Image (spheres, rainbow, N blue to C red):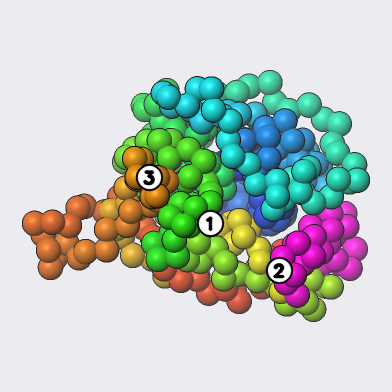
Amino acid sequence: MPMPPLPVLIDCDTGVDDALALLLAARSPSLDILGVTCVAGNIGLVAVVSNTLTVLDAAQRPEIPVAPGYDRPLLAGFANSEFENASHVHGEDGLGLPDWPRSSRPPDPRHAIDLIAEILAVAPEPVTLIALAPLTNLAGFVQRHPALLPCIARIVSMGGSAFSGGNMTAAAEFNIGCDPEAAAVVYNSGVPITLYGLDVFRQVTLTPAEVDLLEGAGQPWSPLLGGLLRYVQRRFGQAKPGLGDAGTVAATILPETLTIHPHRVDIELAGTHTRGMTVVDRRVASKDAHHAAPPNADVAYAIDARRAARLFVETLVE
């Protein structure tokens, strides 16, 4: 008997790889997407919302509610700050496809935090949150609705790293570095967290033959998918495009593809060169009980990259 689909909420800043992730999630029979929330990050919030609606339209899932959240870092001292976006990576439109027709649908009128709260309050079972973006929306939810935290089964967060340093700075990965204070709130919330960081993020790639297959699959979403993958090939000069955030969704569907270890993860908030770093305490508590802190996250060390890529292809070819 097949397993029932996993209920999920997705928080994203829809650039190119978020779009790949949304396509996989929207077409997977293994996930039940209850809602999608948007935050500024890869691109500004207005474009993130437009891109998200456009991708879900292409995936034939217009019934999924899409709610806008924060357009800047949440916490004190940053109220007048803008996110440092990644349009140099994702293109000025966020998808690398400036001529692609955008959705004409309006987003859900609720704020992202309210959508999350209303969905969790009535969900018959705990819901998994897939976080593909700066953690500002989730931090706002943690602060405003602590009584609903038991309704979250787990947060699977694309962000940070244990061994690979950063990509926003030498120490900070982009999603954490955009709003380190928000990340600290989430990592101190007590909710189970899987840290899907740069150590595994870069491992999941497609072969050129798989790109051709996906582009020519003849599905309603195939033209958009092909355009996204060709953009990645051109932008990074890679015949084998990386799936980025889509690997996070694949690992949520197939958690056994990950090799994980429990660790204490803290977010550096003050370092001149290390602000936004995920500080992963790899000391073993059984060997250093005096110093090692109790774990608060399952940190992904490795992923079965070929299996994750096959899942992506099989889901989006059918």
Q: Amino acid at mark 1?
A: Asn
In this view, the residue in front, 78 or 218, is 78
Tell me, yes or no, if residue 238 can be seen here: yes
**Residue at the location (62% across, 60% down)?**
244
Q: Which residues are magenta?
A: 214-239
Q: Amino acid at mark 3?
A: Thr
Alpha carbon distance from label 3 to label 2: 34 Å
Tell me, yes or no, if residue 29 can be seen here: no
Tag nearer the camera, 3 or 2: 3
**Residue at the location (86% across, 39% down)?**
102
Q: Amino acid at mark 2?
A: Pro
**Residue at the location (69% across, 53% down)?**
89
Residue 272: image tag = 3
Identify the mark nearer the N-term, 1 or 2: 1
Counting from the top left corner in percent of width and height, residue 255 is at 48, 63
Q: Quadrant of the C terminus?
A: bottom right
- How many C-alpha atoms fall within 10 Å of the one at disc 2: few (<14), some, or many (≥20)? many
Identify the mark nearer the N-term, 3 or 2: 2
Q: Is residue 161 left or right of residue 309?
A: left
Q: Which residue is mark 1?
A: 167
Q: Main secondary structure of the magenta part?
A: helix
Counting from the top left corner in percent of width and height, residue 85 is at 63, 41
